[in-house]
Image: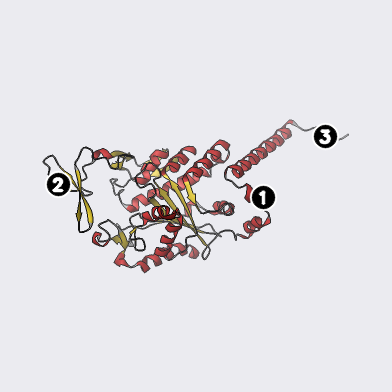
Amino acid sequence: MRDITVSPKRSRSFGKIIFLTAILLFLTFVLIKFLNWEKLVFRGPTTVVKLITDTGLESDRGQVNVLLLGTGGSGHEGPDLSDTMILASIEKDRGDVVLISIPRDLWTPSLSAKINAAYAFGQEKNGEGLALAKKTVRELFDLPIHYAFRLDFGGFTKAIDLVGGIDLDVETAFVDEKYPIAGKEDDSCGIEIETKDENGIGKIYFKDATGEATLLTEENDPFVCRYETISFKKGPAHIDGATALKFVRSRHGTNGQGSDFARSARQQKVILAFRQNVLSTETFTSPNRIIDLAKTFGDSIDTDITNDEIPHFAKLAPKIDPVKIRRVVLDSERPESVLQVGDPKDHAGQFVLIPKNNNWHDLAEFIQGEIFKTEEN
């Protein structure tokens, strides 16, 4: 008679398979439930066909262009102003990615304002901040922007904490003695302030102990109570959400870390480190973490990516090799920079950045050259 008993070793292996299958089914249910994919999952063959044929995402010459925005959110001065703007262009077949950091001080002729105001203007007008931000970038770069994604600072810090913080390599140590303290942006610090209209431009003056009024500039800012000192040491670091926010927002760091170029590079570094943790085994095997992340993003994001399109981005993610991601920073500090500082008299007295020689066509050509360079590799 044939022995049909199951050996203990084989039984344990079978048990592991059952256990892992149960975990996968539970995670699938959690994702469907908390990311509101119920209708998508049961929509039928149309979605499946699109997934198989890769026809579900908008694109231009094989590139999917996504505008990433970071805003202060409630509790911050200018809650809808974009403190961070990154254009991510993803090649659909190979997963090649180029990240282009857009400085918030870039002037936009169509708005007669800096580009960081685009989302805020759209929200204030009709609640269409993403649409106006996409339209503005499209006009400046002569490039279709297919999707946009906005995350506020609160969601940013919570999300990083939920994945256990991030690991990154601080390439250059720096100290910033003027990091803004939330809620103290307009604190007078006991100093008398007055605003004078000069040629249609409001200029801020402060009075010293003798009563003499001095024009406020970046160099003589006396409002020390508005700031705290932060510092980062060179080398590997594990940081939480609040520290990561300071790392990406710092604007007055020593050792050259106060430049737009350095700041944009730090922002991209944090985004990549966060992506690595989100896709880690620890995250995907923790149902509670997945649920909390979904809730956090649900409260803190604004996006025009539809439920139909989420699986297509998920399918695209494994193709992306972080090592091969190219980074481009628009700034005015280096000899090869494509931007320059504009004359404040021509821009309502503001510090702004414009294309070199005020040639917007050249700027658009540069951006397109960087994006479609992936086709040559």
Closest to the camera, between mark 2 and mark 3, is 2
* Most foreground residue, 65 or 81: 81
Asked whether the beta carbons under mark 2 and mark 3 sit within 8 Å of each other, the answer is: no
The quadrant the N terminus occupies is: top right
Task: Tell me the residue that label 2 is attached to.
Answer: 213
Label 1 sits on a secondary structure element that is loop
The spot of residue 230 in percent (x, y) is 31, 39
Closest to the camera, between mark 1 and mark 2, is 2
Q: Residues within 10 Å of mark 3 (few under 14, many from 20)?
A: few
Task: Tell me the residue that label 1 is attached to.
Answer: 42
Task: Tell me the residue that label 3 is attached to.
Answer: 4
Question: Given the current orientation, which residue lies at the most extreme left position?
Answer: 210
Q: Answer whether residue 196 is visible to the viewer in this image.
A: yes
The residue sitting at 67% across, 40% down in the picture is: 21
The residue sitting at 13% across, 39% down in the picture is: 209
Q: Answer whether residue 286 is visible to the viewer in this image.
A: no
* Most foreground residue, 252 or 16: 252
Toward which corner of the image does residue 14 lie, by quadrant? top right
Label 3 sits on a secondary structure element that is loop
The spot of residue 8 in percent (x, y) is 73, 30
- Among the two numbered marks 2 and 3 on one chain, the one whose residue lies closer to the N terminus: 3
